[in-house]
């Protein structure tokens, strides 16, 4: 089990990570979500033991980062956004070297290497010079170096960045496969990626943890509301009358030159009825924007510090 | 395998497998051969011991320069390419990283130095030299190289890139070399200190004449230890910054 307690990290006066606490069960895949600059990479580097926390503790199976740093680092595998690779080496040479750096014997490596190659879908590329590999394969070699020593926690910072759609699908499979032997912490600023790969989601905003839970928990926070955007030619009163009749909650409404721009929440999915009511009232419907994906919208609210309840649950 | 030796082996392999190590080796050996031919094998009658002294004079300077050039990439390059994280996230100490890298670079430098042996052998064929002068002279050049590699390792630890690393290490080494001259311009304790730290004038010259004494051995050991410790502290400070 990974326990993070009251973790904070300052850069001078700037608080990059602000009193973050959470626990992660073994062998689960947890998505670390936040917009660029939310503090994801800093948090991950602190958890990986690469940066010291300004306050707080991190333990893996009871091993504390501060009191037993080398033992702690043995339990961590870390892949930064840009894979750290010695590109002049072959894949095998590189992984053997990294394994030995992390205290593995040659016999351990001989046993472990085929399994890692299989997990990272690198079979057949063992003797390729890393410099000749594509970006997708380099990412896989990056993951392979992170798991070569069978760590308890694997931290992957933006593992899908820069990958093409086919490589993304393959990477998802690789990441899901890691959970059979390790706990996996994956960061991304793309919600759909986290949703497709992870069991739980942690949402970070301006260094604060705003949400912990499953994708279903995140959806529930929307209370079933459906959001839609409208551009309608008519008077404000006439538009408001229709919206009220449809039980819509107006989030924003502006009028310019006889055209109303509105964003509304509907308690149920009554978008077709709404359009019919507007047309029936003699209003000129110029634009109907479909509701944003609920999960995406909730994420946006959380990361912008909007109407979500706030505070980690 | 011991992690220090593992790191040293990796550094040594990097020099052997990339063009950088071979370019430095080629240029240094070429220059050393030219200097030996021009300044050592002169027309005028000279004792073989003096020719050997001349050889160590030029070789020591070139080995010091080679040490600085070899070490400019040691840590700065890892920082530039982002691979330093592999070492920082491994369960090893900063001291192990620094010592491993130092040994790898120094090991390559010693291999380069070994390639110069044909020149003293050439003197032996045509004259007579004491084996003790040869051995002590080579020990001195090896120690001067170790000092240079230690200075370069420290510069590489503090510099953001390789260019800055070579500039810093060259300045530090230059200071250690010309401090005998600076000692003449000052007086009192500062002058004594500057005279003492003069790496080449005070501490290397006895080696090339075949004179071995403890003070000089302690001096080179201290320089290596001090700069490697500074490099270790720099890596620790960067981790905890």
Image: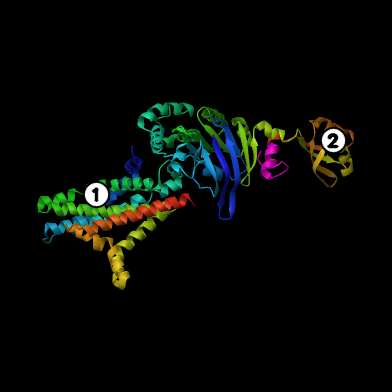
Left or right of residue A76: residue B109: left
Contact, CB < 8 Å: mark 1 with mark 2?
Answer: no
Residues behind callouts 1 and 2 on a single chain: no
Q: Secondary structure at mark 2?
A: loop
The structure residue drawn at horizontal position 25% and vertical position 63%, both measured from the top left corner, is B201
Residue labelled with disc 2: A247
Disc 1 or disc 2, which is closer to the eye?
A: 2
Count of numbered marks: 2
Depth order, front residue of B94/B86? B94
Q: Which residues are magenta?
A: A296-313
The structure residue drawn at horizontal position 85% and vertical position 38%, both measured from the top left corner, is A243
Where is residue B217 shown, x and y percent of the image? 24, 56
Res A162 seen here: no
Q: Is residue A193 above or below residue B229?
A: above
The question of residue A309 being in magenta is answered with yes
Residue labelled with disc 1: B113
Res A140 seen here: yes
The question of residue A143 being in magenta is answered with no
Q: To which quarter of the image does residue A101 belong?
A: top left
């Amino acid at each position: 089990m990974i326990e993070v307690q009251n973790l904070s990290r300052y850069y001078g006066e700037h608080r990059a990570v602000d009193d973050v606490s959470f626990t992660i069960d073994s062998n689960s895949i947890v998505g670390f979500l936040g917009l660029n600059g939310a503090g994801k990479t800093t948090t991950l580097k602190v958890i990986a033991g690469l940066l010291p926390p300004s306050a707080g503790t991190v333990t893996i199976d009871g091993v504390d980062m501060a009191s037993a740093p080398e033992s702690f680092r043995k339990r961590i595998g870390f892949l930064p956004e840009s894979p750290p690779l010695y590109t002049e080496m072959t894949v095998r040479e590189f992984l053997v070297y990294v394994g030995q750096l992390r205290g593995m014997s040659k016999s351990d490596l001989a046993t472990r290497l085929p399994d890692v190659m299989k997990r990272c879908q690198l079979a057949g590329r063992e003797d390729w010079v890393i410099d000749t590999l594509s970006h997708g394969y380099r990412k896989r070699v990056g993951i392979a170096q992170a798991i070569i020593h069978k760590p308890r926690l694997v931290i992957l910072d933006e593992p899908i960045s820069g990958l093409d759609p086919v490589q993304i699908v393959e990477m998802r499979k690789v990441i899901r496969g890691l959970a059979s032997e390790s706990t996996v912490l994956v960061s991304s600023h793309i919600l759909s990626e986290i949703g497709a790969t992870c069991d739980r989601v942690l949402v970070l905003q301006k260094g604060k943890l705003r949400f912990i839970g499953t994708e279903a928990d995140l959806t529930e926070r929307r209370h079933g509301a459906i959001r839609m955007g409208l551009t309608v030619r008519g008077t404000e009163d006439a538009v408001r009358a229709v919206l009220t009749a449809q039980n819509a909650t107006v989030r924003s409404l502006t009028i310019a030159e006889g055209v109303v721009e509105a964003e509304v929440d509907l308690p149920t999915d009554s978008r077709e009825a709404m359009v019919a009511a507007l047309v029936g009232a003699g209003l000129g419907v110029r634009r109907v924007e479909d509701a944003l994906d609920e999960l995406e919208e909730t994420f946006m609210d959380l990361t912008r510090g909007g109407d979500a309840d706030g505070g980690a649950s | 395998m011991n992690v220090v030796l593992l790191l040293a082996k990796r550094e040594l392999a990097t020099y052997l497998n990339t063009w950088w190590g071979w370019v430095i080796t080629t240029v240094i050996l070429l220059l050393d051969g030219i200097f030996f031919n021009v300044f050592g094998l002169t027309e005028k009658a000279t004792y073989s011991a003096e020719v050997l002294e001349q050889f160590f004079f030029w070789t020591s300077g070139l080995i010091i320069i080679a040490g600085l050039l070899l070490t400019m990439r040691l840590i700065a390059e890892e920082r530039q390419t982002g691979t330093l994280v592999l070492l920082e996230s491994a369960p090893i100490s900063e001291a192990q990283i620094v010592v491993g890298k130092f040994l790898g670079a120094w090991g390559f430098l010693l291999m380069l130095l070994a390639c110069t042996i044909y020149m003293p052998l050439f003197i032996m064929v045509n004259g007579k030299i004491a084996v003790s002068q040869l051995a002590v002279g080579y020990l001195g050049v090896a120690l001067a190289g170790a000092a240079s590699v230690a200075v370069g390792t420290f510069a590489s630890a503090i510099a953001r890139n390789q260019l800055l690393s070579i500039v810093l290490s060259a300045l530090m080494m230059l200071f250690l070399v010309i401090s005998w001259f600076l000692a003449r311009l000052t007086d009192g304790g500062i002058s004594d200190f500057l005279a003492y730290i003069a790496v080449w004038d005070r501490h290397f010259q006895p080696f090339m004449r075949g004179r071995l004494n403890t003070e000089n051995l302690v001096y080179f050991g201290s320089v290596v230890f001090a700069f490697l410790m500074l490099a270790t502290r720099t890596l620790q400070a960067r981790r905890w910054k």
